[in-house]
Amino acid sequence: MKKILLASTALVATAGVASAQDLGVALSGSAEMGIFDNGNDNSQFFTDLDVTFTMTGETDNGLSFGATIDLDEAADRGEPGRFESPDVQGGENMFVSYGGATLTMGDTDGAMDAVMPEMALAGGSLADDETAHGGFDDQDGHILLGTDSGLSFDGAGDGQIARFDYSYSAFTFSVSAEQLNNGDGIDYLGVDSGDSVYGLGVSYAGDFSGVAVEAGLGWQTISDFADTYGIAATAGLASGVSFGATYSKTNLEDDVVTVAGLSDDSIDHYGLGLGYEMNQFEIGVNYGKYESDDYEVSGYGLAASYDFGGGLEMQAGYGNTEADDDLFDDDGFDTYSIGLSMSF
Amino acid sequence: MKKILLASTALVATAGVASAQDLGVALSGSAEMGIFDNGNDNSQFFTDLDVTFTMTGETDNGLSFGATIDLDEAADRGEPGRFESPDVQGGENMFVSYGGATLTMGDTDGAMDAVMPEMALAGGSLADDETAHGGFDDQDGHILLGTDSGLSFDGAGDGQIARFDYSYSAFTFSVSAEQLNNGDGIDYLGVDSGDSVYGLGVSYAGDFSGVAVEAGLGWQTISDFADTYGIAATAGLASGVSFGATYSKTNLEDDVVTVAGLSDDSIDHYGLGLGYEMNQFEIGVNYGKYESDDYEVSGYGLAASYDFGGGLEMQAGYGNTEADDDLFDDDGFDTYSIGLSMSF
Amino acid sequence: MKKILLASTALVATAGVASAQDLGVALSGSAEMGIFDNGNDNSQFFTDLDVTFTMTGETDNGLSFGATIDLDEAADRGEPGRFESPDVQGGENMFVSYGGATLTMGDTDGAMDAVMPEMALAGGSLADDETAHGGFDDQDGHILLGTDSGLSFDGAGDGQIARFDYSYSAFTFSVSAEQLNNGDGIDYLGVDSGDSVYGLGVSYAGDFSGVAVEAGLGWQTISDFADTYGIAATAGLASGVSFGATYSKTNLEDDVVTVAGLSDDSIDHYGLGLGYEMNQFEIGVNYGKYESDDYEVSGYGLAASYDFGGGLEMQAGYGNTEADDDLFDDDGFDTYSIGLSMSF
């Protein structure tokens, strides 16, 4: 459900668009053209396009509010027009903000996803190969539930999340909730798992003698099923080099372990990222691994980009996934994409 | 089919947007966030969003023309992309206007719906609880056909309506037609019902010594099935108090009564509304009842809103439906919603 | 698949919009209202509307780039949200251009369609009756594959075309490719047909002593199935009269003829067009015929329009299709439409 749960990077970009526009409805767009291999060993044409509607308002006494949806989320090939129904999330999100306090609902990150920096630090690619490999953690879902990569439980319900953020100095504190079954309880794997995902997190963004540091600590839980905590940090040097590391761990309830026939009551993820930016050129590489006694998958990703200016980039990406421990074994699969990325 | 048939209030809002914009395509938007209970006794998150495309043009000699569609009508969860087909209506409407004469086609009201004021006079709510209860008449459909609340037959075909309005002084005269089966005849309940819905109406909007009066008289028919007439009026005082009443009656053809196994050849609806506006605060309450020897359903609705300015409102709504005569019986169901409504 | 494959005329219009706007995302729109008969002998209401998103960018060193999608292509009644998937084409296209060289991908014409002028020379209609009759060739597909009218093989795969154009003086040279099965081979009618459609073309647009001449010569092939060449030219006189002729021929591989049980290994199409423009008035007529020993279909189309200015036109169209050789026989079917066309 990557397309449903808005990544933190996208939120930043959206905020940028909004502030640069007058109040009302603003349009921005993107398009990509090139070739790619989605893992089936065929190289094929790649064409993609999207339009984003960004709505911004302000009350007389200084409350700001806004909402966003993308055209591809509105049309939604998987479940067309899902955003039309107020009881589920179909790509729409909206917020109200006053001072350092912001309440966001809909297609937004849970607290853990919101605070933890990701490991794709530079470059980008048409097919997001560098973040789509099996070892990546975007904190957008949970591998055990099959909702997306990550260990955060976001999207365990209908993806309709409410998150409250409070910024104080360089810190942002976040609390989030997602209903698993529109207010009713739900069974996962036959275990009565409660009715909500809850999350807590704190993030830091600051500067230590010229080194830009971002760090986050998050926790999410489905109370009768499992909980996860995670910690991640990145550092960006003035030389253009950036690096980071991430670690998260899910602890499963005993019931879940028994019913699912697992031998291990925990799942670990760790990841590393490295990026380099020089003038118009960017390159990033990341590695990650999910690990339990029952399950192991790792992968690495590469992304490079060259910026022509005015919104046009040449991009190339590569992702490699291994289902066992041997990184360069032939058992896994890999994907690549190369072409032009446009933003308008 | 409430979402398909544009309510009169929405038409007014759209006109406002258009006149405030240059010719071409203008965007406006709305979003809502909060919680609601849709009648299943669970409180759940509510997130909704929409974008409206309003197109406006003018010829050299003073003909004006325009068209509108909403993003949620274009995506359309029920029947995706329906607006793409010119033989049915999927949320699109367009008009051409000269002097007091206007021809509108597509997602527009039939003559009866166009002329009769509704009883939700003040306030509003995220889930439209105040107009979604079983006793409300929005003149958008017919309860016997199950197309929507009301007794007007709008939407008995594909919702593709043509309406001609002529304004003269404080009066507007309206004539409308909707094909039931794209030019072919149709059977309802086994009765050969003809091929069209026709409608006639006249409305009045004026001022009597400081009291703003709106009134409408309408008639619609499916010639071999049934006809309905309706009358409604509202008055708005300078004190902020407004009130209104509505009455409509469907007379069924004898064939229909026999085939449907009914004992009564008529269905009545009456309704009352009361509103109060004071500075940023609005509250409205309405009551309505459908009645025949075979069928009885009533309900009441409440809506309250507080306007923060700039397009942001706090809104709360409640609706209660009773399927028998006892208004405060436990047999019925109720809905509520509360949260923030944004317009951009 | 006419709606998927952008006709050359639409490309021209889009370019006009883009150049009149600032860089970024621009909106234009259209709407149509009237009545039509789609060939079933019922006259019914016609309502249609569309919004086009045109995105335009420019790098610092003079590369221009852009992308387009229509709202009805995004929603797409046939396959909702198809544009969201980068491996297929769902109405989106994008280009990058430098000097006389342009690379376009997605919802664009193959080389043959791009270079050959069509025979609907003046006027227009709500339901495109003048181009939808069975004898018309819009070079958008292939009648043997049933993808659309024409003999070009465009859309034989997923409609995701890559075309490179190079303009030199009054000439434009075009090369195109479309994958038939996302990089894999495909069987048509049981014949292993290869993996791609390839196309070549050259067009000319110039002026001979006041006569505006457009001409094109194109060739497309599915290497192990068939190939087609086509030639077409139109001339526009200063008096407002224009005329043109088109001819194309498909040669089928012997295997295909055998397997499909055909007796003729070729299919011919020829067509003629005539147009007249005088002040606000335009009228066009065209005739075309597909012919082989196994198959014969012909048709003619009429379109007339009156321009009120400001984007409003009255339009009427008529199309007549005959499945045998006798043009005025009663065996065929005809369609008409009449009403108002609006552009915003």
Image: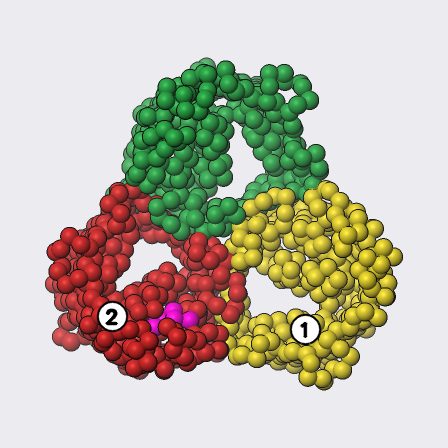
Chain colours: A yellow, B green, C red
Disc number lying in front (2 or 1) = 1
Residue C311 as seen in the image, left or right of residue B143 = left
Question: Mark 1 — residue?
Answer: A133
Quadrant of residue B182 within the rendered picture:
top left
Question: Mark 2 — residue?
Answer: C117
The foreground one among B189 and A288 is: B189
The CA distance from mark 2 to mark 1 is 47 Å
Quadrant of residue B30 within the rendered picture:
top right
Q: Which residues are magenta?
A: C153-157
Residue A289 as seen in the image, left or right of residue C190 = right
- Residue at 57% in and 21% down: B298
The foreground one among A120 and B260 is: B260
- Residue at 60% in and 54% down: A91
Within 10 angstroms of label 1, few (less than 14), some, or many (20 or more) residues? many
Q: Chain of mark 1?
A: A
Amino acid on which disc 1 is placed: His
